[in-house]
Image (cartoon, rainbow, N blue to C red):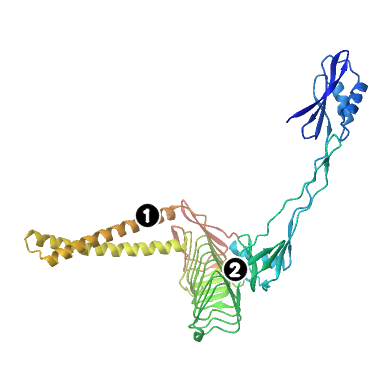
């Protein structure tokens, strides 16, 4: 910190009292010279002549009188206080605008489509600018310029234009926050059912189907799909899906799926699946979670797999229906490992066949019975051998990487609250167990010692 020295008071031909002001003018200090004979009244006269007029602490001046040789702060300026920060004023329902972010976190919502419908040219958000705060004042009584509050930028994304302080939709659609950006996604509303005669519907945006998806129909959307009926046939592919009724066919979502029930369904989720009542004889795969807890919460028949957790009220049935629940390994990686093992096995068979052909041609060459046609075949088989060997090594390397990932102990669990019936097979990581007697309020986790059974935990 730099200081500005104000000439001291001379007493008995020596400089007995000195006053210093910081370069920013916000602090003033007084110092009595060692051996000074100056009085306290002399100090006050010196302060008056120094020009220091604001923020004076009289007790500090008195303390300096009794602390000869030490520099004592006796005045402080008032720093300017920042004014109000800029903020966003919402011209539509704020909670609905942000509710999509819960889906991005893998959480279930009643409707994954906030349905904040906007028209082209409509204002969605207004930026209220920051303001200046009160001026400050230094110890010399001079004004210190005011400071404004923190400014913010309008987080404009897809189909949103910033006009001054306004965020305006450039097309009709649904407004929502996505990855911290305000965007407008085109919205398609389909009245009634989607039937086989409608063929394949592809849409770049979000879709609301006010009926059901029936046999033979296919719906593919880049955004989110809300089905007011059920998926009773056909195939549905979307980012997130909310189905008011149930699923009886194939559904593939890149993130979160919510539905009332699943019956004889095949479900793949890149994040989580939330079913309210029952998963019946279905194949459900999710990278993170499968929760069947909202209503009846029953998993019976079929296979349910998740990377982190499966949670339900009831697993299996008293009639011994084959039910499998697996957690602990990303199902997508598990499927990749199974595919690699199958491909490796086939490659090894092919290599054996190629090697047998080369051995036969080699024997023919040694006896001088190798024709030009056979030589060409030998060259072709040699190229095939190198290609298959290279592919085999790549697959084996990838399988080794997956095996290392599988060997790491993950924090995964199967939680069954009300009843786990005998006959249900549970697997956590590398550990597996067939339940031989009915159990209640249980949690299955993997430990170094094997598959542990602990009390149910939310």
User: Residue 235: x, y in percent?
Assistant: 49, 77
Let me know if residue 98 appears in the view: no
State which quarter of the image contains the N terminus: top right
Q: Residue at x 68, y 67 (%)?
A: 168
The residue nearer to you, when weighing 8 against 348, is 8
Q: Which labelled disc corresponds to residue 355?
A: none
Image side of residue 101 versus residue 450, left or right: right
In the structure shown, which secondary structural element does the residue marked by tag 1 occupy?
helix
Disc 1: which residue: 400
The residue nearer to you, when weighing 344 against 431, is 344
196 in relation to 59, above or below? below
Q: Residues within 10 Å of mark 2 (few under 14, many from 20)?
A: many
Q: Residue at x 80, y 19 (%)?
A: 69
Of circles 1 and 2, the one toward us is 1
In the structure shown, which secondary structural element does the residue marked by tag 2 occupy?
loop
User: Residue 193: x, y in percent?
Assistant: 57, 84
343 in relation to 247, above or below? above
Image side of residue 60 versus residue 450, left or right: right
Disc 2: which residue: 293
């Amino acid at each position: 910190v730099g200081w500005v020295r104000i000439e001291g008071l001379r007493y008995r031909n020596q400089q007995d009292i000195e006053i210093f002001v910081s370069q920013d003018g916000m602090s003033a200090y007084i110092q009595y010279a060692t051996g000074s004979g100056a009085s306290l009244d002399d100090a006050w006269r010196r302060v008056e002549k120094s020009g220091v007029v604001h923020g004076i602490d009289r007790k500090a001046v008195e303390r300096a009188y009794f602390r000869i040789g030490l520099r004592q702060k006796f005045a402080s300026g008032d720093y300017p206080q920042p004014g109000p920060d800029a903020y966003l004023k919402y011209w539509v329902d704020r909670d609905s605008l942000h509710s999509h972010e819960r889906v991005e976190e893998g959480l279930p919502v009643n409707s994954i489509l906030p349905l904040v419908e906007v028209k082209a040219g409509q204002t969605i958000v207004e930026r209220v600018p920051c303001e200046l705060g009160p001026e400050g004042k230094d110890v010399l009584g001079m004004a210190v310029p005011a400071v404004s509050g923190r400014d913010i930028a309008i987080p404009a994304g897809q189909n949103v234009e910033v006009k001054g302080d306004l965020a305006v939709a450039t097309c009709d659609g649904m407004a929502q926050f996505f990855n911290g950006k305000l965007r407008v996604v085109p919205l398609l509303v389909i009245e009634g059912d989607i039937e086989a005669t409608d063929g394949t519907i592809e849409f770049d945006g979000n879709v609301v189907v006010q009926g059901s998806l029936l046999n033979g129909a296919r719906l593919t959307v880049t955004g989110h799909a809300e089905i007011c009926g059920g998926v009773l046939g056909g195939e549905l592919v979307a980012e997130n899906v909310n189905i008011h009724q149930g699923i009886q066919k194939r559904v593939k979502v890149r993130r979160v799926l919510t539905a009332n029930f699943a019956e004889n369904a095949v479900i793949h989720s890149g994040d989580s699946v939330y079913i309210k009542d029952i998963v019946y004889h279905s194949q459900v795969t999710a990278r993170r979670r499968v929760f069947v807890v909202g209503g009846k919460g029953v998993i019976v028949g079929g296979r349910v797999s998740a990377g982190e957790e499966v949670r339900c009220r009831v697993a299996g049935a008293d009639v011994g229906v084959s039910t499998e629940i697996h957690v602990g390994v990303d199902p997508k990686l598990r499927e990749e490992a199974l595919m690699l093992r199958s491909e490796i096995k086939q490659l090894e068979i092919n290599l054996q066949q190629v090697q047998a052909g080369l051995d036969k041609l080699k024997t023919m060459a040694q006896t001088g019975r190798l024709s030009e046609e056979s030589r060409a075949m030998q060259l072709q088989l040699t190229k095939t051998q190198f290609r298959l060997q290279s592919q085999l090594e790549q697959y084996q390397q990838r399988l080794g990487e997956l095996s290392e990932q599988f060997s790491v102990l993950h924090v995964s669990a199967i939680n069954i609250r009300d009843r786990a019936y005998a006959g249900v097979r549970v697997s956590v990581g590398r550990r597996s167990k067939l339940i031989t007697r009915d159990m209640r309020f249980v949690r299955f986790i993997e430990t170094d010692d094997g598959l542990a059974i602990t009390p149910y935990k939310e």
